[in-house]
């Protein structure tokens, strides 16, 4: 099914509507063949989805297109002409825009400045920026996206979803002929996703060629025209979306049958491990009370902004509460910060792996053992052999795709970085584990492995609090579900009575 790389170069006429053609692209890193002989094309007004497991090579292909990585072999044609894309600037000049998996904004500049970076409208006085025009144009771009945000604020004051929209505005402002989006939806709410899809449809009408990467297959089926599946750096196939269904895409991705199910194992709950009593933090949380027992998985559901991450932060000592208390095994928990929380036996797997979970310059081995150095130390010396063995076990269990445990975290694909964050907390002997969107950016095959790990932790008697926006995951893995709305507990549902409708009803303020 893999298209043979074209051997001749300049003489091959592309189909009339092909905007971008990548032929026989290969790329290797030390110990990793990230791409081998990948051919991929996008047509005018088409959404071409690129899917594959974590580490399959999707982001690498996009970085080559964007001039951010060099290719070893292969060629790129734009509207039938060979293009030498040797720098990000060159890619931009050629009309290629990429929205990266990890954002690329300058944190201290405003949204407007980021959108027009390097192309600021000039004032009449030489050397000065025409801020009025820039702000007006930035505002128009943002309005067109149907989002509300203050374009004068530095982007590090914006929510992740808003930063995403700034990236999209930046791409549309450049009048790109090819726009690639690398997991744009991972951080968006339903509402924002609907806006993004509207925007994509409008870009299609204008003839823009769009490359769309996502691990959420339902998105692929609602927006894509064609789908290309990558596995181990090679193209498995390219098909019109009509010829595919969920099962066939998964089979192409993982090369084997997997049961796309949630393998929940029932556990008899033990004593209460974690309890919140009337926890209040002004402006964020109001009178939050609930319990989590040993062996239980309690799901924390709600819309984005309902206060779920706030609950996690307060328990973890990252934020202070104004009143109320947190009890661990019946005793009031006094934590002055995350270090205390970790020492007391609480682990937090964060949704923002880059900022809170991972030290990118460190190796996989060092990251995994960081939160529990005691376990690998003797007389103040870190026993590297032990560390290596521990890390290697996790790499195998979680199927982290890497040439070895000495690889730096920054060289891993996005999903594999997320798995390292998980491993780090699994290695601590926490009594309570809080998972905040644990499978975000994780491919369908690996999700099942993460659920199985959660089962194992529950069976060991850990108390698990799982924040998730994916309702099938909440319904599938939780023994009980607490639904939040505007900083309060809106209701609690048992595993038996919970349905998507009941959760949404409570999450949107229904009684
Ligand atoms: N700078 C680098 N140095 C070494 N290896 C790298 C580097 N960048 C990527 N790789 C490796 O290349 C392979 C492909 O990675 P890539 O980021 O393209 O995957 P992906 O398909 O985007 O995965 P994900 O779904 O997790 O984002 C992975 O094995 C990754 O570890
Ligand atoms: Mg990626």
Image (spheres, rainbow, N blue to C red):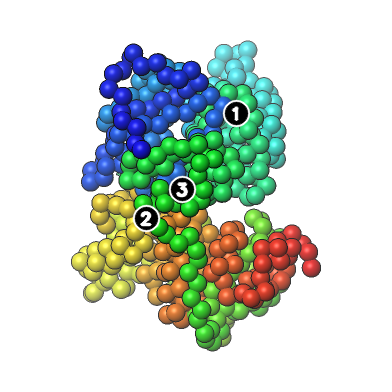
From the viewer's perspective, tell me whether residue 439 is left or right of residue 85. right
From the viewer's perspective, tell me whether residue 428 is left or right of residue 139. left
Q: Is residue 63 visible?
A: no
Q: Earlier in the sequence, mark 3 or mark 1?
A: 1
Quadrant of residue 478 within the rendered picture: bottom right
Residue at the spot 33% in from the left edge and 40% down from the top edge: 234
Neighbourhood count class around disc 1 (C-alpha, 10 Å): few under 14, some 14–19, many 20 upward:
some
Q: Secondary structure at mark 1?
A: helix
Neighbourhood count class around disc 3 (C-alpha, 10 Å): few under 14, some 14–19, many 20 upward:
many
Residue 256: assigned label:
2
The image position of residue 332, as x and y in percent, is 57, 81
From the viewer's perspective, tell me whether residue 345 is left or right of residue 165. left
- Note whether ligand 1 is within 8 Å of mark 3: no
- Residue in the foreground of this view, choosing between 387 and 266: 266
- Viewport quadrant of the C terminus: bottom right
The image position of residue 400, as x and y in percent, is 34, 56
- Residue at the limit of the structure toward the left, as seen here: 385
Residue 204: assigned label:
1
- Residue at the limit of the structure toward the front, as seen here: 243
Q: Which residue is mark 3?
A: 249
Q: Secondary structure at mark 2?
A: loop
Residue at the spot 36% in from the left edge and 51% down from the top edge: 255
Q: Is residue 255 above or below residue 484?
A: above
Q: Is residue 295 visible?
A: yes
């Amino acid at each position: 099914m893999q298209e043979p790389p074209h051997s001749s170069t300049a003489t091959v006429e592309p189909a009339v509507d092909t905007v971008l053609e990548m032929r026989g692209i290969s790329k290797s890193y030390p110990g990793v063949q990230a791409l081998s002989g990948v051919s991929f094309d996008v047509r005018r007004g088409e959404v071409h989805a690129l899917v594959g497991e974590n580490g399959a090579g999707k982001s690498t292909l996009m970085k080559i297109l964007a001039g951010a990585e060099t290719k070893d072999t292969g060629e790129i044609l734009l509207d039938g002409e060979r293009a030498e894309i040797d720098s990000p600037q060159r890619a931009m000049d050629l009309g290629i825009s990429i929205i990266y998996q990890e954002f690329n904004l300058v944190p201290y500049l405003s949204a407007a400045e980021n959108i027009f970076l390097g192309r600021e409208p000039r004032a009449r006085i030489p050397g000065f920026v025409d801020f009025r025009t820039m702000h007006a144009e930035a505002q128009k771009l943002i309005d067109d996206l149907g989002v509300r945000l203050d374009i004068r604020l530095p982007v590090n004051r914006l929510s992740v979803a808003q930063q995403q929209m700034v990236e999209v505005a930046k791409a549309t402002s450049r009048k790109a002929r090819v726009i690639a989006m690398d997991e744009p939806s991972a951080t968006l709410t339903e509402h924002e996703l609907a806006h993004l899809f509207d925007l994509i449809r409008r870009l299609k009408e204008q003839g823009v060629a769009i490359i769309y990467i996502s691990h959420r297959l339902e998105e692929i089926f609602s927006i894509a025209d064609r789908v290309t599946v990558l596995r181990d750096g090679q193209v498995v196939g390219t098909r019109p979306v009509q010829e595919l269904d969920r099962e066939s895409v998964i089979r192409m991705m993982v090369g084997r049958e997997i049961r796309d199910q949630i393998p929940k194992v029932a556990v008899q709950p033990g004593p209460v491990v974690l309890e919140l009593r009337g926890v209040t933090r002004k402006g964020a949380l109001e009178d939050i009370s609930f319990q989590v027992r040993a062996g239980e998985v309690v799901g924390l559901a709600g819309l984005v902004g309902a206060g779920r991450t706030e609950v996690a932060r307060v328990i973890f000592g990252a934020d202070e509460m104004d009143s109320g208390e947190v009890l661990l095994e019946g005793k009031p928990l006094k934590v002055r910060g995350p270090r205390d929380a970790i020492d007391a036996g609480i682990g937090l797997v964060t949704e923002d792996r880059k900022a809170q979970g991972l030290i990118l310059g460190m190796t996989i081995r060092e990251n995994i053992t960081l939160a529990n150095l005691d376990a690998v130390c003797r007389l103040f010396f870190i026993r590297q052999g032990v560390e290596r063995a521990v890390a290697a076990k996790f790499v195998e269990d979680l199927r982290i795709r890497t040439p070895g445990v000495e690889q730096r975290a920054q060289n891993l694909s996005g999903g594999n970085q997320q798995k390292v964050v998980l491993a780090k907390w699994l290695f601590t002997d926490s009594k309570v584990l809080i998972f905040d969107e644990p499978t975000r950016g994780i491919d369908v095959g690996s999700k099942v492995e993460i659920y199985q790990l959660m089962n194992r932790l529950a069976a060991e008697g850990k108390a698990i609090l799982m924040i998730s926006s994916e309702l099938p995951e909440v319904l599938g893995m939780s023994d009980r579900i607490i639904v939040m709305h505007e900083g309060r507990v809106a209701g609690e549902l048992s595993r038996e009575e919970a349905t998507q409708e009941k959760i949404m009803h409570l999450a949107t303020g229904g009684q």
